[in-house]
Amino acid sequence: MSQFGVIGLAVMGKNLALNVHNHGFSVSGFSIDKPEVDAFAKYEDDKLTACYTWEDFVASLEKPRKILIQIMAGRPVDETIKKLLPLLDKGDILIDGGNSNFHDTTRRCEELAQSGIHFIGMGVSGGEEGALNGPALMPGGDEEAYNEVAPILEAIAAKTPEGRPCVSYIGPSSSGHYVKMVHNGIEYAIMQEFSEVYDILSQVAGKSNDEMSEIFDSWNKGLVPSYLTEITTAVLKQKDDLTSDHIIDHIFNEASYKGTGNWMLEDGVSLGAPISVVAEAVIARFMSKATTRQEHPEVTVKEDTPELIAALEKSLQLAQAVAYAQGFQQLTMAAKAYDWNLRYPSIAQNWEAGCIIRSAMLKDIENAYEKDATISVLFQDPYFKSLMENNLPALRQVIAVAASAGLPTPTLSASLNYLESIFNDNLPANLIQGQRDYFGAHTYKRNDRPGTYHMEWYEEK
Ligand code: 6PG
């Protein structure tokens, strides 16, 4: 009998199953795709069983059964649950490890609770390599069920530099998939920030791919140690195997997406979360497809100074902090709206290793929320406040250079605008309120006395 089962043996499911097996647990694997099961069967031993039917798979598992569904998000998950339900017993645990939309997870939690089946919606980050060697896991749902599977999840998860597992119970219902969605929104934001910095380095500073690769490598050892810095270094120096050029110069500049970043924006809009950097990152991907690709005037502003390079490093560090800050800000708003008790230090810890947005800064974020979990804006924390004060002049300088060169900087500019706004008690929204009241009698509040007011506006003839 196996202690754990995995449905879906494409690369993520297979690697997660092997990871479970490599940590000494017995595991069964099943897929409706026979060649996937054949490939999995090659690893068979006394602790790994490949199953070809739903019945054999379910029968091979110890009770309560612990089953990870690792397949394409959407309808296939509902179809899989429908197939499994008649074969399961009350108390069995289903875990959906796909990038499911959190609304689907809410519904599935409710539906399965009626059948006495525990459901965990779990974000999994780290790609193929992470799945095999240590992903970051974001499980939400039934806490009792989480405690049953915790020993296995803690064993297979990535470990922080201090050796703590990158998994912890996130909260009830769909909160795990929600946190993964926010992870992906932050991922979109930081990736777009890197692209803008790359654009300035290349077009304004005139750096070659190899020079840029070295610059990012030095930042990885400097102010921006992160997985995305690491892979940017690698992507920029990679040579093409069809030509002798760098591959980056032959990659078509149209960004694809499967939509999880867009979902964060959708829910952010419904919550009123000021996640401008994520919004700009999502829209930058749309723009890469929407551009009419007409000739853009050549960049004539050239500046290749150590000061600009240093300002770019500081800007990237600060913009990265804004991306995280906006993610956590949306989480605090979602926790309130959906009545989830989210533990922000644990979420930061879950992201410290294994996932795509892992970086040294997440430890500072963990510390910030450990000190004060009630902050709504990360930059209220003294460490991040001083990071903001130190790096803001650099970000202003970079935006000015890019603007005079005619280069778009949607996320870097949004980061700057966020920081210029978030502590500003003098934003010009008073004029908007005046206009709303003028044309629609929408009322306004005053800054000198309580209550709600409407002005009998009159126009000078
Ligand atoms: C991860 C990633 C992953 C996601 C890809 C692609 O955490 O491992 O977030 O889950 O699917 O990053 O996302 P897009 O296709 O939307 O860019």
Image (tube, rainbow, N blue to C red):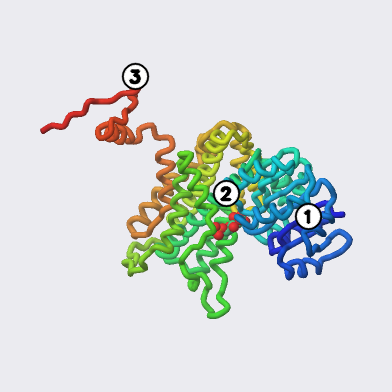
Which amino acid type corresponds to the residue marked 2 in the rendered image?
A: Met
Residue closer to the observer: 34 or 365: 34
Determine whether 196 is above or below 43 in the image: above
Residue at coordinates 34% horizontally, 55% vertically from top-left? 403
Q: What is the C-alpha distance between the residues marked 1 and 3? A: 63 Å
Q: Position of residue 458 (x, y in %)?
A: 17, 29
Q: Position of residue 107 (x, y in %)?
A: 61, 44
Q: Is mark 3 within 8 Å of ligand 1?
A: no
Q: Quadrant of the C terminus?
A: top left
Q: Which residue is mark 1?
A: 5
Q: Position of residue 254 (x, y in %)?
A: 46, 65
Relative side of 93 to 445, left or right: right
Q: Which residue is mark 3?
A: 449
Q: Which mark is residue 171?
A: none
Residue closer to the observer: 348 or 318: 348
Q: Residues within 10 Å of mark 1 (few under 14, many from 20)?
A: many
Residue 22 visible at all:
no
Which amino acid type corresponds to the residue marked 3 in the rendered image?
A: Arg
Q: Quadrant of ligand 1?
A: bottom right
* Identity of the residue furthest to the bottom in this view: 243
Q: What is the C-alpha distance between the residues marked 2 and 1? A: 25 Å
* Identity of the residue furthest to the right in this view: 46
Kindly report which numbered mark, 1 or 3, lies closer to the viewer in this rendering: 1
Which amino acid type corresponds to the residue marked 1 in the rendered image?
A: Gly
Residue closer to the observer: 71 or 215: 71
Indicate the secondary structure of the residue bearing disc 2: helix
Q: Earlier in the sequence, mark 3 or mark 2?
A: 2
Q: Residues within 10 Å of mark 3 (few under 14, many from 20)?
A: few
Q: Which residue is mark 2?
A: 181
Q: What is the C-alpha distance between the residues marked 3 and 2? A: 41 Å
Q: Earlier in the sequence, mark 1 or mark 3?
A: 1
